[in-house]
Image (cartoon, helix red, strand yellow):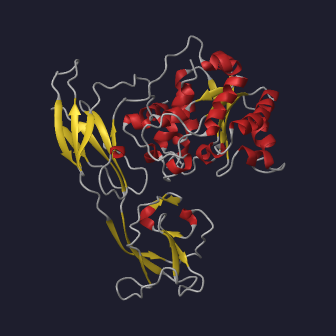
Amino acid sequence: MIRLHLLLLLFPTLLLSGAVPSPAKLTLVGEWQVRVLIPADPGGPGVAVEVVVSVPKPEAVEVQAEAHASLPRFNPRTAGWVKGRPLNALRAQETTTPYLLDRESLVVRTAAGNAGEVLQMGQDYEADLDWGTVGRAEGGRIGTNQPVYASYRYYPLRLHALILTRDQKVELRLGEPRAAAPKAKSAQPGERALANIWLPGRVERLEPKHLLPVLEANYPEAPKPVSSIAEQLLPNTMRKIRTGKSVRILAWGDSVTDGGYLPDPARERWQNQFLARLQQRFPGAKFELISEAWGGRNTASYLAEPPGSPHNYREQVLGAKPDLIVSEFVNDAGLSPQQVEERYSKLLADFRGIQAEWIILTPHYVRPDWMGLTRETDIDSDPRPYVAGLRQFGAAHGVAIAEGSKRYGRLWRQGIPYTTLMLNSINHPDAQGMGLFADALMELFP
């Protein structure tokens, strides 16, 4: 029970009203100056606060003679972060974060210091300067096991916080520079978070897209219906919960469900957070959690696996004989609504054949350009056809939909760029991002 309480303290549920009193208004008054106006609040002191805050211009970080024991052959036909050896300072778990490298700054030598011979890009090595990866060029002077030394400049990610202090002063608290998943400094008791300023690498001047005022304290939870979604669409699960019978839950998905990249998967994965919260809400219930996940794959991958495979659909999913299946497949996001209807109808027939009930998690937001987005503000509506298809499918077939997508889409209203929750800067949520899935799932239950 102690571990459960610790978990709930680490990842608190978002149950409060989303409104904040008199949100601050931010206006650019110079390349690096922001006017902050906090309107007088009828429930507060009744005095407006106005101040101009100077934001430090991002400075490049210098890396000198970074040692690489060898370079792989440069592969131009693959994703940018695996075309060659990643530059260490740009690493974001298994990837790199793009557009942080100063493209003109990269120098690769045969030895540390100026004594080393300068190698030539395009002759001795090739580089993806967007993603910061380097590899040997065909016919170049770099041997298979030859060490090289890279010097370069880069601009890290930073998320600064504007805080209204206890004495009604506006304070800019600088965020730590990170190659991925930067966090803003938190408001302390008696203080108020006004806004965050998002600096995604090299920024020549502040623009409105960099200013993220806190418009709501948290996700605005809808009022609970008289009969919850779980009571309507998961009656067998709810009956077992209320009678104290064991409920077997299968979490089925891709690398996000696997969660092996997290510092503490056993506590931080969405399904573990969900189970802890479910157990707290229904202390007399008995739950068994099974996770079946396959990184880099989707539902089609499972359906195509032959018998005996570690990820054979009939053996590992249907054969687990779950009472409740919760699926998460951001890797299905390329499906059209028609493809969702076709494939998921087959899954639904199979699940009903084993008397299992189903919750579908709508996926988190991923890299903006992968979603056709150009910004991280004003993005409440998920543009992916797959997500629209999931909602249509759930409504047509009586399948419960847990709206992870909607919670990600509103993070900007809390002053949070959603990419700052991605540990690999692409599509792997951190513990806070996993908690949003648990929030969405708990919303379904009475």
Determine whether 19 is above or below 107 in the image.
above
Determine whether 77 is above or below 30 in the image.
below
Q: Position of residue 405 (x, y in %)?
A: 54, 35
Name the outermost residue toward the top. 226
Classify residue 39 by image quadrant.
top left
> The C terminus lies in which quarter of the figure?
top right
138 or 324: nearer the viewer? 138
Name the outermost residue toward the right. 307
Q: Residue at x 30, y 50 (%)?
A: 206
Count of numbered tags: 0
Q: Position of residue 158 (x, y in %)?
A: 34, 52
217 or 93: nearer the viewer? 217
Q: Residue at x 31, y 43 (%)?
A: 185
On the question of residue 386 being in view, the answer is: yes
Q: Position of residue 439 (x, y in %)?
A: 51, 30
Q: Residue at x 15, y 25 (%)?
A: 47
Determine whether 85 is above or below 136 in the image.
above
On the question of residue 169 being in view, the answer is: no
Q: Would you say 165 lies left or right of 9 here?
A: left
Q: Position of residue 312 (x, y in %)?
A: 78, 46
Q: Residue at x 43, y 47 (%)?
A: 420
Q: Would you say 344 lies left or right of 10 here?
A: right
